[in-house]
Amino acid sequence: MTSVGAAFPAMWRELAPIGRHTGSGGYRRYAWTPADADCRAWFRSQAEDRGLAYETDRNGNQWAWLGDPAAGDAVVTGSHLDSVPDGGAFDGPLGVVSSFAALDELRARGARPRRPLAVVNFVDEEGARFGLACVGSRLTAGQLSPQDARALVDADGVSLAQAMEKAGQDPDAIGADPERLARVGAFVELHVEQGRALDLLDRPVGVASAIWPHGRWRFDFRGEANHAGTTRIEDRRDPMLTYATTVLAARKKARLAGALATFGKVAVEPNGVNAIASQVRGWLDSRAADEDTLAEVVAAIEQAARERGARDGVEVSVVRESFTPVVEFAHELRDTLAALLGAGAPVPVLPTGAGHDAGILSAAVPTAMLFVRNPSGVSHSPAESAAEDDCLAGVSALADVLEGLACR
Ligand SMILES: [Zn+2]
């Protein structure tokens, strides 16, 4: 009898203080910052402590290998260590820590891998700093050109290329890595659930079926700046009004379609308390079970914005900043996972509205995901949580999966 996840609490404790903001209690682990460097150093030391072969790929993703990568058909697991602004402790790190713990568990079981195994930390998954999610996996999969990546800039005007250089990673080397992907036979990402489906089913672990298509749209509302105290209501061209109406429309259109639509970021000019705004820029995040529904929801929100803008004397323009199509995880691999984990009762198979590196890689590699119960469903917040027993159930499930795929 082995003690599953014996190293889990110590790994968790070591990571816990890195990049944690003392005021908010949330994590600020942004790509290529000192906090990110500390997380990366942690990853490397975990790899080396276990005698795994450590390497950083051309895009800055970190790999820890058990077995010879050149043998091919590798079973790879892992996630990311970066965070959203004031993110929680579990989104990303749970997958990486569980991966190392699952390798420990395989060794404790005396399992003999017939395929190479690896743990990976994909860089810049959240896109918190440069505005584009999954940069590390997108580059590797050839879904983001090196030129476009290098030109991404953060809020301080620092480009991704400059940030990488400062962190000691060569920005001229980035780009698609088909040879690396060709060595991967399967990628399994364990992740804290970002919703309450498992809690509602009273189950600690589930398997992902699909990732909803999702995208980000920038809405620009242009009116006219003027004095808040002297401008008659009739004479105003107030973009805040159009924006506010659009936010309400987004909620309504999404609810009617069974979709999701969120304005979570807004920039106001001139942003003065006694000034009518000249411009409001709002970012819409929208997701739905299928691409047609998503397109319809966003079109309906845009139409509502334009109609209201016409009444307010406000110009409206909409730019799609990013789009990720629906991801159906490889059915065969998904069914294999469900079979490996469903010895007692069938394991829950659920869709998710959140994007992941696994979704990006699924175009190139058979890919699957495991979710671990998150009782509140809260994610991208310091309140994000998972019980230790559930985390250990996740480690055990991941070990079962790795053993089933690589050791039989
Ligand atoms: Zn994540």
Image (spheres, rainbow, N blue to C red):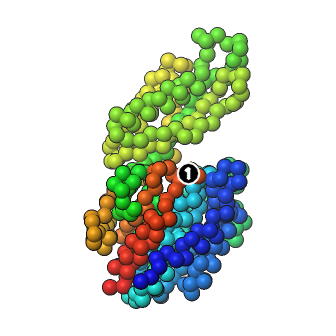
Compared with 56, 247 (above or below) is above
Task: Write down the quadrant of residue 281 in the picture.
Answer: top right
Compared with 159, 304 (above or below) is above
Depth order, front residue of 90/184: 90
Task: Write down the quadrant of residue 373 in the picture.
Answer: bottom left
- Mark 1: few, some, or many residues within 10 Å (few <14, many ≥20)? some
Q: Name the residue located 58 percent from the left edge and 40 percent from the top edge.
A: 265
Q: Name the residue located 63 percent from the left edge and 53 percent from the top edge.
A: 26
Q: Identify residue for label 1.
A: 383
Q: Can you give x and y, in whole percent of width and height, for residue 148 in the image?
A: 57, 57
Depth order, front residue of 342/245: 342
Q: Is residue 233 left or right of residue 355?
A: right
Q: Can residue 296 be seen by looking at this rendering?
A: no
Q: Name the residue located 70 percent from the left edge and 30 percent from the top edge.
A: 270
Q: In terms of secondary structure, where does tag 1 sit?
A: loop
Q: Can you give x and y, in whole percent of width and height, for residue 86 in the image?
A: 62, 51
Q: Can you give x and y, in whole percent of width and height, for residue 287 in the image?
A: 41, 45
Residue flagged by tag 1: what amino acid is it?
A: Ala
Q: Quadrant of the C terminus?
A: bottom left
Q: Quadrant of the N terminus?
A: bottom left
Total labels: the figure holds: 1
Q: Residue furthest front?
A: 1
Q: Is residue 18 left or right of residue 121?
A: right
Q: Is residue 72 left or right of residue 384?
A: left
Q: Can residue 308 be seen by looking at this rendering?
A: yes
Q: Can you give x and y, in whole percent of width and height, for residue 277 in the image?
A: 65, 26
Task: Write down the quadrant of residue 365 in the picture.
Answer: bottom left
Q: Name the residue located 70 percent from the left edge and 71 percent from the top edge.
A: 168
